[in-house]
Amino acid sequence: MRTTLTLDDDVAARIDEELRKRGGTFKDTVNDLLRAGFQAQSETKKVKRFKARVRAMGRRAGMDYDNIGDLLEQTEGSSHR
C-alpha cells in the first residue's frame, strides 16, 4: 500500500537513527519498526492484571476518619510528620 505520512520531528529523527544503524531502506526500516511496535503492544495486553482483594476493616470508636491528618495523629502520634 502506498500512502503519505507526516512524521513528527522526534519520530523522523529516530527513524533516521535506525536507518544509519541498519543500513536498509526507509521503507523496510519503517515497516520493521511498526511491526516491532505492534508486537510489543500485543505482548503487553497478555500481562495478567493485578486484582486487589478488598475487605471491610470496620471502624474504631473515637477515630475521626474524615480528616486524614487527625487520623494519623491519633494512630501514629506526632512521628507521622
Image (cartoon, rainbow, N blue to C red):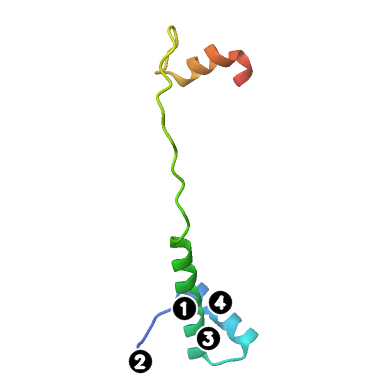
Q: Are the residues tagged 1 and 3 within 8 Å (C-beta)?
A: no
Q: Quadrant of the C terminus?
A: top right
Mark 3–mark 2 CB contact (< 8 Å) = no
Q: Secondary structure at mark 4?
A: helix
Q: Residue at x 51, y 79 (%)?
A: 33
| Nearest to viewer (mark 4 / mark 1) | 1
Q: Residue at x 41, y 15 (%)?
A: 59
Residue type indicated by callout 4: Arg
Count neighbours of disc 3 (C-alpha within 10 A) and say few if under 14, some if 14 to 19, many if 20 or more: some
* Residue placed under numbered mark 1 in the picture: 34
**Residue 46 placement (x, y as % from top left):** 45, 61
Badge 3 or badge 2: first in the primary sequence:
2
Q: Separation of disc 3 and disc 2 at Cα?
A: 15 Å
Q: Answer above or below: position of 30 versus 70.
A: below
Q: Please give the residue where the numbered disc 2 appears in the rendered image.
A: 2
Does label 1 or label 2 sit earlier along the sequence?
Answer: 2
Compare residues 29 and 57 and report the one nearer the observer: 57
The amino acid on which the numbered mark 2 sits, given as a three-letter code, is: Arg
Q: Position of residue 30 (x, y in %)?
A: 49, 83
Q: Amino acid at mark 1?
A: Leu
Badge nearest the viewer, 2 or 4: 2
Alpha carbon separation for disc pair 2 and 4: 22 Å
Q: Which disc is residue 14 wearing?
A: 4
Residue found at x 44% / y 51% = 49
The location of residue 1, given as percent across then percent down, is 35, 91
Disc 4/disc 1 C-alpha distance (Å):
12 Å
Residue behind mark 3: 29
